[in-house]
Image (spheres, rainbow, N blue to C red):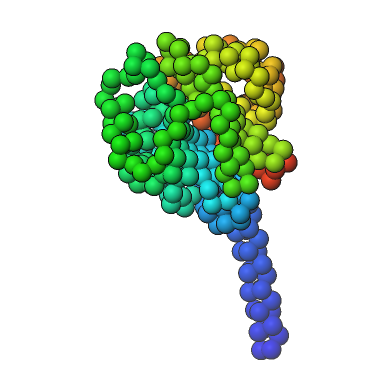
Amino acid sequence: MKNSSAKNKKLIYLLVIFVIAVITSIGASRGWWGEFSEDPGNTLGDYTQSNYIDEENDFSVHFIDVGQGDCTLVMCGKESLLIDAGENGHETEVINYLRSMKVDKLDYIIATHQHSDHIGGIPEVLEEFEADNIIMPRLTKAQTPTNSTYTAFLKALQKTDAKIISAKPGLKYTLGEAEFEILGPVTNDCEDINSMSAVTKITYGENSFLVTGDAERDEELEIIDNGSNLDCDVLRAGHHGSSTSSCKDFLDAVSPDFCIISCGENNDYGHPHDKVINRLEKYTDEIYRTDICGSIVMTSDGENIEISYKNQ
């Protein structure tokens, strides 16, 4: 009986070891959150505050998938910057993403320009989250939209206690241990408000990220002529990868190691355009698209950048 009991205990012990090994293997392959693609860099699960922002200097940039629109969240420690909030109809996705990151207040919001696919979700975001500062281009009367989206945006600004700041080159702000600088628009006389976009360079340690709104070639060249330091590690390509943006001179000045393109799956505009992809590939083969990858997250320790995403 003693020998039988010992054998049973040994079998149970081996079974427990086997089950633990299987669970560990599954967890490693699935990240505990669900299945991912075979791409070894695809390790994004549902990021939480405990993973990313309970240390003062933790830094991450989130290119949130909002279809054919733009939305970027920058977090450093407990401070946060939201650049755009997507088109009408995607505000719930933005709000839920912010909540999942345990954001309770936005230190800064940048509305890159007044097109609906960039500002459409901002009124609802302002209903849910307090904001300290809102940075946006100042338009002339002739440039000012008259549609319902912009009207809702203006009404939301009137209700908020946030400080409204006109986007101008040279404005610099701190975000925890990071900082960001407004590089454009350089002038305010463009007929197309795409080229009135607030262009932002974010720096954390030795790493830098450039978010360009829908800036087109004219604005890109103006920023170059203004003497701005455009060299950066990560470029969020302008205007959803349109051929009107990311011109050769601009890419020469930026020289990115990574490129992010925010665009909707099977969108009506053909974004990103093949010409732009071909131009970007001359600088990097690290090109990531929200229509393929879903939301994309970059984390930095001030020297190295890691990229993760979860396929749709």
Relative to 300, residue 194 above or below = above
Q: Residue at x 51, y 21 (%)?
A: 185
Relative to 278, residue 302 above or below = below
Residue 304 visible in the shown view: no
Quadrant in the rendering for residue 280: top right
* Most foreground residue, 301 or 8: 301
Relative to 30, residue 41 above or below = above
Q: Residue at x 44, y 21 (%)?
A: 266
Q: Residue 12 appears at what percent x and percent y? A: 63, 74
* Most foreground residue, 226 or 266: 226
Quadrant in the rendering for residue 87: top left
Relative to 5, residue 300 above or below = above
Q: Is residue 99 left or right of residue 89?
A: right
Q: Residue 205 appears at what percent x and percent y? A: 70, 41
Q: Residue furthest bottom?
A: 1
Q: Residue 224 appears at what percent x and percent y? A: 63, 16
Residue 155 visible in the shown view: yes
Q: Residue 99 appears at what percent x and percent y? A: 43, 49
Q: Residue at x 54, y 52 (%)?
A: 78
* Tally of numbered tags: 0
Q: Residue at x 35, y 46 (%)?
A: 128
Quadrant assignment for the N terminus: bottom right
Q: Is residue 87 left or right of residue 200?
A: left
